[in-house]
Image (tube, rainbow, N blue to C red):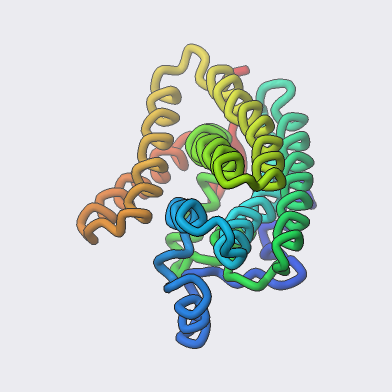
């Protein structure tokens, strides 16, 4: 990999104020969430939307929703920016690096808009924990988990399937829903900000679809990996929201570990530092 990619691999994401992952909050912060929004279990976009619909005048719910969403925008800046550095020396289709640069800039705009919306509601970045926290390594506990994540990030097929298609697809639905919520409760700022973000997400999902077709062209096995990673990413997100059984979570994890092993067999070098599909 290049110098910048090597540097980024050795450095976690930094933000001011620092990232504070929801998964790692202490008892005191859980107590504050109980007081502010009725509990940590309510700090989820779908729950907060329903709470806002039921009580449109409660600014705390709006601050919480804006905080939860903007956290992911800052994480997106980090994720797409790292893709630029990780993939620039790989044999990827023409235009993919420029697309990642464009998405990084889109996430910067979204983060700026989201932060200003949060301030409009009387909040400040950092008031609530982060739903996402920069580079995903922040939430990984073991070396095996970090290795698996790194391989997925280095492999454009797996990354585009999980992020551009599955996760950005979920963001597409989220922004559309929150924009409609703003219209229903008479909040023009909410409606406009998330309608603007929604338009970008349409492009982001299209970028993922288009480049996955290029990467998997005449390679049925690669296409199958892309479809399976997309499906399991969506299943994993649903499982987290529904708090499903440990057995189901274990099955999802085992699948992703298997896909990581298969991906590493077609990547080049120790820890899979390159990816070279046919152009």
Relative image position of residue 254 (x, y in whole percent): 30, 51
**What residue is drawn where x is 66% and y is 51%?**
73
In the displayed structure, would residue 172 be above or below residue 72? above
Residue 163 visible at all: no
In the displayed structure, would residue 31 be above or below residue 170? below
Residue 256 visible at all: yes
Give the residue at the far top of this rendering: 218
In the image: residue 71, left or right of residue 99 = left
**What residue is drawn where x is 54% and y is 61%?**
131
Q: Would you identify the image quadrant in which residue 132 lies?
A: bottom right
**What residue is drawn where x is 60% and y is 59%?**
62
Picture quarter with the C terminus:
top right
Relative image position of residue 119 (x, y in whole percent): 75, 62
Viewer-proximal residue among 21 and 146: 21
Query: How many numbered marks have been drawn onto this rendered protein structure?
Result: 0
In the displayed structure, would residue 107 be above or below residue 226? below
Q: Would you identify the image quadrant in which residue 201 lies?
A: top right
In the displayed structure, would residue 273 be above or below residue 14? above
Viewer-proximal residue among 112 and 253: 112
Relative image position of residue 59 (x, y in whole percent): 61, 64
Viewer-proximal residue among 161 and 33: 33
Relative image position of residue 9 (x, y in whole percent): 67, 58
**What residue is drawn where x is 71% and y is 49%?**
77
């Amino acid at each position: 990999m290049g110098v910048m990619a090597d540097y980024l691999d050795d450095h976690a994401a930094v933000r001011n104020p620092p990232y504070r992952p929801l998964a790692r909050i202490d008892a005191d912060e859980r107590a504050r969430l109980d007081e502010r929004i009725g509990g940590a279990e309510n700090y989820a976009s779908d729950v907060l939307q329903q709470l806002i619909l039921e009580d449109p005048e409660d600014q705390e719910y709006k601050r919480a929703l804006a905080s939860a969403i903007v956290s992911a925008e800052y994480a997106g800046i980090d994720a797409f920016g790292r893709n630029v550095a990780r993939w620039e020396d790989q044999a990827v289709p023409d235009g993919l690096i420029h697309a990642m640069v464009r998405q990084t800039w889109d996430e910067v705009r979204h983060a700026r808009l989201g932060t200003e919306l949060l301030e409009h509601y009387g909040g400040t970045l950092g008031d609530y924990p982060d739903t996402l926290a920069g580079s995903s390594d922040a939430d990984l506990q073991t070396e095996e988990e970090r290795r698996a994540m790194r391989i997925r990030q280095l492999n454009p097929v797996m990354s585009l399937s999980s992020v551009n298609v599955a996760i950005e697809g979920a963001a597409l639905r989220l922004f559309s829903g929150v924009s409609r919520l703003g219209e229903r409760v008479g909040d023009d700022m909410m409606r406009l900000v998330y309608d603007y973000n929604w338009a970008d997400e349409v492009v982001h999902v299209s970028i993922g679809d288009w480049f996955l077709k290029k990467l998997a062209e005449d390679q049925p096995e690669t296409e199958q990996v892309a479809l399976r990673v997309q499906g399991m990413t969506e299943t994993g997100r649903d499982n987290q929201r529904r708090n499903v059984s440990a057995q189901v979570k274990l099955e999802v994890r085992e699948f992703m570990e298997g896909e990581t092993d298969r991906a590493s067999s077609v990547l080049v070098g120790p820890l899979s530092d390159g990816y070279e599909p046919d152009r």
